[in-house]
Amino acid sequence: MEDVIKLYWSLRADSERYGDEVGEIFGVGHHEDPASFFGMAFNIITMTLELLDHYHVLWGKLNPKEFSNPEETREQNGQRVTLLQKMCFIELMSAFEFSAKKAVLENQQLFGEFKGRIYLAGIMERSKDKGLLSEEQLRLWKGASTLRNSLVHNNGIAEKDGVYSYPEVTVTLRSDCMSQGNIKLFGLVSKWLLLEARSWLENANKQIQPTQNTRG
């Protein structure tokens, strides 16, 4: 549990640092595009940390002898920790998709026009075509989107097989099975997400001149 909490403290620090960096590049505040994603991420991760800390303190006060089946109770607690991380990952993906949609609409000279609804998968496909992503980066974005969609729409059960190797964790999806990985899986994928989002937001908005976006 301590390792999970430590990981989310580092994610919180990352979101703040990346927001500062993107804000500095474009001369905007944390609440302004294209840095606003990291302000949203900071709040999402902070809320996750508050809940993780609450459970950590609560469980530390519990006496295992008071439970008829301590192992089952421990397993249930672990499931709660995983659920909180799933919720955080889903919210981070949704926040980034929201920011990415705004970015492509504001940078049509680079991305061109999208027909119909704009989805993250389509944005990343177009980003690959425009040279903003490598083939492997696109594949990992597809993996993150597939994982998010399976959590939101299918209770975490994948519809097709897939193995996605992120820098610090491998996500294994098996058709008709729950996603597999260790207790820090969602936190480590979120770590990758924040770093990739920072790079993408900078590259996608390069045609915006810093002088056009000044702090009020």
Image: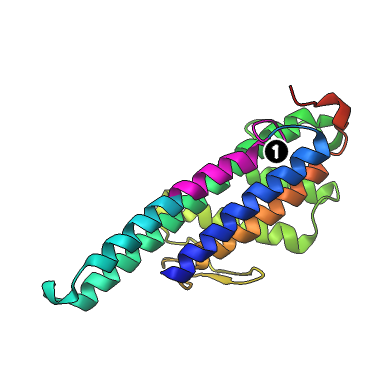
Q: Quadrant of residue 32?
A: top right
Q: Is residue 167 visible?
A: yes
Q: Over which residues does the magenta segment extend?
A: 30-47
Q: Is residue 133 magenta?
A: no
Image coordinates for residue 99, horizontal then vertical, percent = 65, 37
Image coordinates for residue 27, horizontal then vertical, percent = 80, 33
Amino acid type at circle 1 is: Ala
- Going 75% across and 26% down the picture, which residue do you hit? 215
Location of the C terminus by quadrant is: top right
Location of the N terminus by quadrant is: bottom left
Dominant SS of magenta comes to: helix
Residue tagged by mark 1? Answer: 35
From the viewer's perspective, tell me whether residue 174 is left or right of residue 40: left
From the viewer's perspective, tell me whether residue 80 is left or right of residue 145: left
Q: Nearer the viewer, residue 182 or 177?
A: 182
From the viewer's perspective, tell me whether residue 78 is left or right of residue 20: left
- Going 66% across and 61% down the picture, which residue do you hit? 140
Q: Is residue 126 visible?
A: no
Q: Is residue 70 above or below residue 22?
A: below
Q: Is residue 68 above or below residue 37?
A: below
- Going 53% across and 64% down the picture, which residue do you hit? 7
Q: Nearer the viewer, residue 14 or 148?
A: 14
Counting labels gives 1
Image coordinates for residue 200, horizontal then vertical, percent = 75, 48
Q: Residues within 10 Å of mark 1 (few under 14, many from 20)?
A: many
- Going 50% across and 45% down the picture, which residue do you hit? 44
Q: Is residue 73 above or below residue 210?
A: below
Q: Is residue 125 above or below residue 119?
A: below
Image coordinates for residue 98, horizontal then vertical, percent = 61, 36
Q: Specify the farthest residue to the top.
A: 216
SS label for mark 1: loop
